[in-house]
Image: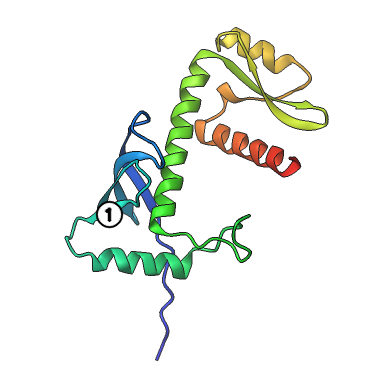
Amino acid sequence: MKATIERKPVIALKAIKHSAFASEETHCYQATIYVDGKRFATVRNSGFGGGDEVHPLSGNYDDVRDLEKRIKETYDRKPSKYFADGFQPTLESICCDLVNDHLRERDLRRRLKIRSYTVETADGHRAVFVYKCKPTPPNLQALLMRPCVHHVLNLMPIKDALALVKEINDEEEARA
């Protein structure tokens, strides 16, 4: 008898609606969960500290339990300062991470329209710097000419800029 190896499910959220003013203990949001590119369920949280409500499109909650099982079998534990052996991702924690990513991307897009952002070396470490100048092509080109500037975030694809900012933030946390 041949053992089947479960493939790690690719989970995405679409049609995310987030309400910052109603978010008290957790994110107040609703979204559609896609698993492996197919609509799977709707998810919502009222923002008062309770768990997410997941409603599978099939109406069969065994599908949610099966997905949770696949996640447990295929997702690696994440390092945690609270748990010595790490944290086991769940559908709820994955959805929370995806909402956080969505909010970070939305925030960075807004900021990049207003100000110019660079990555420079300060005190021997990389850091993100904000310039009050508008992100016009001449201003961004002038920033690129500065010898201390490694990257101009406004000129990068948004996913690359987000990854770089996250990497720098992680480095700063590790030094703290």
Kindly identify which residue carries mark 1: 54
Considering only vertical position in the picture, is 90 above or below 171? below
Q: Residue furthest right?
A: 124
Considering only vertical position in the picture, is 94 above or below 85? above
For the point 79% across and 19% down, the residue is 147
Where's the C terminus, which quadrant?
top right
For the point 60% across and 38% down, the residue is 166
Instruction: Give the class, few, some or many, for how many residues have Cα within 10 Å of label 1's Cα (few <14, many ≥20).
Output: many
Horizontally, residue 89 falls left or right of residue 12, namely right
For the point 64% across and 37% down, the residue is 169
20, 170: nearer the viewer:
20
Which amino acid type is marked by label 1? Val
Picture mark count: 1
Q: Is residue 154 visible?
A: yes
Q: Is residue 39 visible?
A: no
In the rendered image, residue 160, in percent from the top left (x then y), is placed at 56, 35
In the rendered image, residue 81, in percent from the top left (x then y), is placed at 63, 55
Where's the N terminus, which quadrant?
bottom left
Considering only vertical position in the picture, is 114 above or below 162? above
Q: Residue furthest left?
A: 59
In the rendered image, residue 27, in percent from the top left (x then y), is placed at 38, 40
Considering only vertical position in the picture, is 123 above or below 143? below
Element carrying mark 1: strand
For the point 42% across and 37% down, the residue is 102
Colour scheme of the rendered structure:
rainbow
In the rendered image, residue 7, in percent from the top left (x then y), is placed at 42, 67
Asked which quadrant contains residue 18, the reply is top left
Horizontally, residue 166 falls left or right of residue 44, namely right
